[in-house]
Image (cartoon, rainbow, N blue to C red):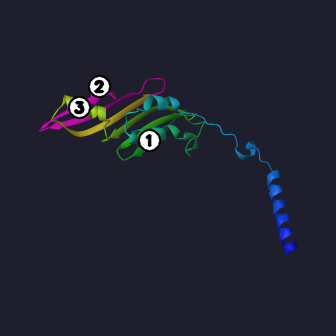
Amino acid sequence: MKNFIIGLLVLGLTNLSVAQNKSISQSELLPEVTIVPRNLTYISKVVDDNAPLKVKKLERTVARYDVTEHPDFELEDIQAFEVIFQESNARVIATYDEAGKILKSFEKFKNIALPKDIVKQIMMKYPGWHFESDTYLVRYFQGKEAKKYYTVKLLKDDNRIKLKIDPSGRIL
């Protein structure tokens, strides 16, 4: 029994010493990763902090999409590649170049939750009116400022009006 315990002790110490002698360098653990920000310009020009979360999520999906991985993408045959992203009441048509950068986009979001500041502005200026529908539109062209605005249809009795509002709440 004594020999058995001594044998287990020696075997256990041998395993510990082998485990401690083996060193793994950081380069063996983590391969080098390169992050290529393709569409940062698009994101910076299009994403509005006050826009609803649904809008921001779809815009980020469009920016992260790697068009070069698409099965129909053939580098020698095209100079631009159009992709349509669609969800319920939301549609983004984005045109990518051969490197995967967004050249232009058209975005349309119907009946989304309007930012609180915009609702407040409308209610102050048009008391007694009710929201019938709204649409958020964004037009982006590479090298230009994005055009973003809301169209809101209001209803009061039998009267209807259509408003065009910029993201800051200014009625155009």
Q: Position of residue 66 (x, y in %)?
A: 55, 41
Q: Which residue matches tag 1?
A: 57
Q: Which mark is residue 78?
A: none
Badge 3, how many Cα within 10 Å: few under 14, some, many 20+?
many
Q: Position of residue 118 (x, y in %)?
A: 29, 32
Q: Are marks 3 and 1 in contact (CB under 8 Å)?
A: no
Q: Which residue matches tag 2?
A: 170
- The residue located at (30%, 32%) in the rendering is 117
Give the residue type that dot 1 points to: Lys
**Mark pair 2, 1: CA separation:** 25 Å
Report the magenta residues as a range: 141-170
- The residue located at (51%, 35%) in the rendering is 96
Q: Nearer the viewer, residue 53 or 76?
A: 53
Asked if residue 70 can be seen in this view, the reply is yes
Q: Position of residue 88 (x, y in %)?
A: 36, 47
- The residue located at (69%, 40%) in the rendering is 32
Q: Of the residues under marks 2 and 1, which one precedes in the sequence?
A: 1
Question: On the rendered structure, is 33 left or right of 3?
Answer: left
Secondary structure of the residue carrying tag 1 is: helix
Question: Does 169 appear above or below 108?
Answer: above
**Mark pair 2, 3: CA separation:** 9 Å
Question: On the rendered structure, is 149 left or right of 77?
Answer: left
- Residue 52, picture quadrant: top left
Badge 2, how many Cα within 10 Å: few under 14, some, many 20+?
few
Q: Which residue matches tag 3?
A: 122
Q: Is residue 96 magenta?
A: no
